[in-house]
Amino acid sequence: MLDTLSYYLQFSFVQYAIIVGVLIALCSSLLGVTLVLKRFSFIGDGLSHVAFGAMAIASIINVTVGDGSGKSAYQNDMLIVLPITVISAILLLWTGQNTKIKGDAAIAMISVGALAIGYLLMNIFSTSTNLSGDVCSTLFGSTSILTLKTTEVWLCIVLSIVVVAAFILFYNKIFAVTFDENFAKAVGTRANAYNFIIAVIIAVIIVLAMNLVGSLLVTALIIFPALSAMRVFKSFLSVTICSTIFSVVCALLGILLSIIYGTPVGSTIVAVDMAGFFVFSIMGRIGKKA
């Protein structure tokens, strides 16, 4: 097993997958605690479906950029997917505050619509000879994490740094908005502005995570680490730190297991997350009895 792992680790595409996987797991776990506590967990699911629809549009438009070496160009869907997902996050926030369309209804409406339109466009305008394979890869992230370009890795690194820096910079405000938004508004905190920042950061995380686990499994990266950490710890800071460590370890372990046994990367990571959740649940029950 170790010989097999050391052999695959020599390849650059495996190294890229591990780097991006760890960064995505780190970013997705930071705001997972906030979304769970605000009971807005399904925004990740809604935005992932929007990202799927945007991916279909990007594949039709076929935007290409250089590969970083100056020798060739390749299709870069993120140039279209990222702006559309960010705009959708803003719309979800706005419609969620509208008394006529509640938050959960807005998420359901936008996510289902985007998923249906995306699949429709892929069928009508597809030039691929393996449409079902392309759809499966987009939904479950079967192989996309192992086909990353150098520019995509650097883009992920830059966006991850921005996400972490924004979370650290606005930590106190995010904490206040998470636990008591009305009180935060009463003391002069611009809660709507920080909700907007949270929505934009989540949109960026969703787009990054699609390469790792696919659009249907993105929510697992956000929710499982937070729920697992809450089984054992109680304070916001300790839960956030534990959630981050849990997410990174599970993502790394999932990627390595998928390389060794040839299983789908996204599904393997989520399976490890689920196993970790059950372990933490048992630890939490033992801790209460002690």
Image (tube, rainbow, N blue to C red):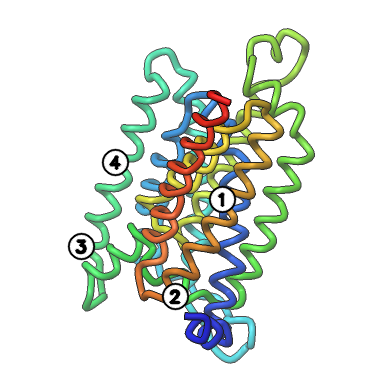
Relative placement, left or right, of 245 versus 135 is right
Front residue (pair 255, 57) = 255
Q: Amino acid at mark 2?
A: Ile
Give the SS element for disc 1. Answer: helix
Query: What x and y, as percent, mark residue 162?
Result: 71, 51
Mark 2 crowdedness (10 Å alpha carbons): few <14, some 14-19, many ≥20: some
Give x and y (percent) for residue 201.
61, 43
Secondary-structure class at tag 3: helix
| SS under mark 4 | helix
Marks 4 and 1, the one that precedes in the sequence: 4
Q: Which mark is residue 259?
A: 2
Q: Residue furthest front?
A: 290
- The answer to whether marks 3 and 2 mark residues whose Cβ atoms lie closer than 8 Å is no
Instruction: Identify which amino acid the numbered label 4 is placed on.
Output: Gly
Q: Is residue 153 above or below residue 272?
A: below
Disc 2 and disc 1: Cα gap in Å? 18 Å
Q: Is residue 61 visible?
A: yes
Residue on which the image places disc 4: 113
